[in-house]
Image: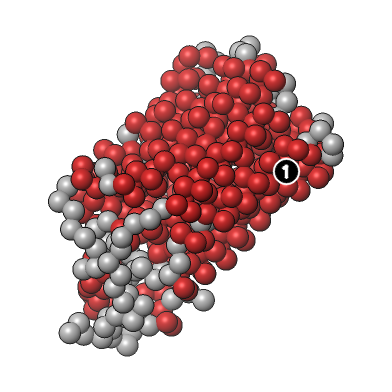
Amino acid sequence: MIPPLPPASGASLRKRWMYLLPAVFVTYSLAYLDRANYGFGAAAGLAGTLHITGSQSALLGAVFFLGYFGFQLPGAAYARRHSARHLIFGALLVWGTLAALTGVIRQYWLLVLDRFLLGVAESAIFPAMLVLLTHWFTRTERSRANTLLILGNPTTVLWMSAITGFLIHKLGWQMTFIVEGIPSVLWAFAWLGLVRDRPRDASWMPSEASAALEQQLEREQLGLPRIGSARLALIRADVLLLSTLYFFWSLGIYGFVLWLPTIIQQGSAVGIEMTGLLTAVPYLLAVLLMLLVSYISDRFLERESLVWPFLVLAGVSLLASFVTANQSFWLAYITLILAGGAMYAPYGPFFAIIPEIVPKNVTAEVLALVNSCGALGGFAGSWLVGLLQARTGGSRAGYLLMAASLIISGLLMFTLRYTRHRVAFANPNLSIPQSALPE
């Protein structure tokens, strides 16, 4: 019998949400800023300044994801075996520098190399963050913890959309890249001081509470099948299916993120400042839906059934935008808002699935494989949507591609079938009191 938590453990466990998650959120927010602000540079005339074609601009926006794809597995393995904290510290220094250089370099192929290396520097961040959270949060908390990490994505685009347009208007797109790259370098040192890899390493966590939490996490591992090596885990049918659907999901979402400013500007003929404000609205809905869906997911321990309906809804909404784009910009824009919110909503439940189907000795590598396939989807979405935009002179073909990809990902999740050894995690002998959990 595992001893009950000491009386002070509730307050100690609540500190995880106050100490760890804000640091995780800020770090991922900075990472997303330095990859997504390219879309505003493109909308502000980057191609004209550098004297490159629309197709070259599309490749420049997409090449980040090739670097992001290539180094996920080694980075995730390092985070599992050694330290996610130190890996992320180094990555912050490197990617902040490379992001700032985007506004300095004038040679096209040097800029391509810079954006590729930026992808390499950021490649381990997301799987390393997810591995870190598995060391700190239990099954009944994980969807919310994942969501508070991933909220760095739409929240960043929300404020970036509102602010970057004004920065570009005042400073130009090159100086904006420099200004938005420097904070990552400065934040690296704050990260190193705030974050620890495991509860037992945190000075603010009493030893009794950290021991009880780590015992609870070990207890949850008992219900999972043993997998002897990462190679065996990576070729499982359920893992491959999750990887495939995340490819199509990311194709749709990154095409949306990078090219939405251009789509809005072309459709509405407004200035870059108003383009930024209009671009921000879908991400506000995304934030609200992500919080709601993650709460429901942890409350009822539901995962797949909260993923596929939103992905299909996002695809159908983009189809509606495709149909109405030539009739009414504002009607098409309303469907874009719905699509943006729906495609982000199920992130928390989706990434809570993986630690529930594979044990911790291979969780990092599986997360890295799934996210690597998402990086390939991000490359395809960024490049193809931009290429279609350049070749056709409009956004309709891009809408159609993103819509089809999101619907395919939703259907793949709907068909997902895997065997779980379900354990009564909801009421274990060692339970974290409800008072320790966020409302």
On the picture, is 85 further left or further right than 272?
A: left
- Looking at the rendered structure, the kind of residue marked 1 is Ala
Above or below for 408 versus 295? above
Quarter holding residue 165:
top right
Residue 265 visible somewhere in the drawing: yes
Residue at x-position 24% and y-position 47%? 233
Q: Is residue 58 above or below residue 408?
A: above
Pick whichever, 313 or 364, lies toward us: 313
Task: Please tell me whether mark 1 sits on a helix, a strand or a loop.
Answer: helix
Residue 113 falls in image quadrant: top left
x and y percent of residue 350 in the render?
44, 55
Say whether residue 166 is visible. Answer: no
Q: What residue is drawn where x is 43% and y is 33%?
A: 376
Lateral position of residue 313 relative to residue 73, left or right: right
The location of residue 232, given as percent across then percent down, is: 20, 45
Q: Quarter holding the N terminus?
A: bottom left
Point out the residue furthest to the bottom here: 7
Instruction: Give the residue at x 56% y 50%.
Output: 311
Q: Which residue is mark 1?
A: 320
Q: Looking at the image, is 144 positioned above or below residue 391?
A: below
Q: Residue at x 43, y 83 (%)?
A: 435
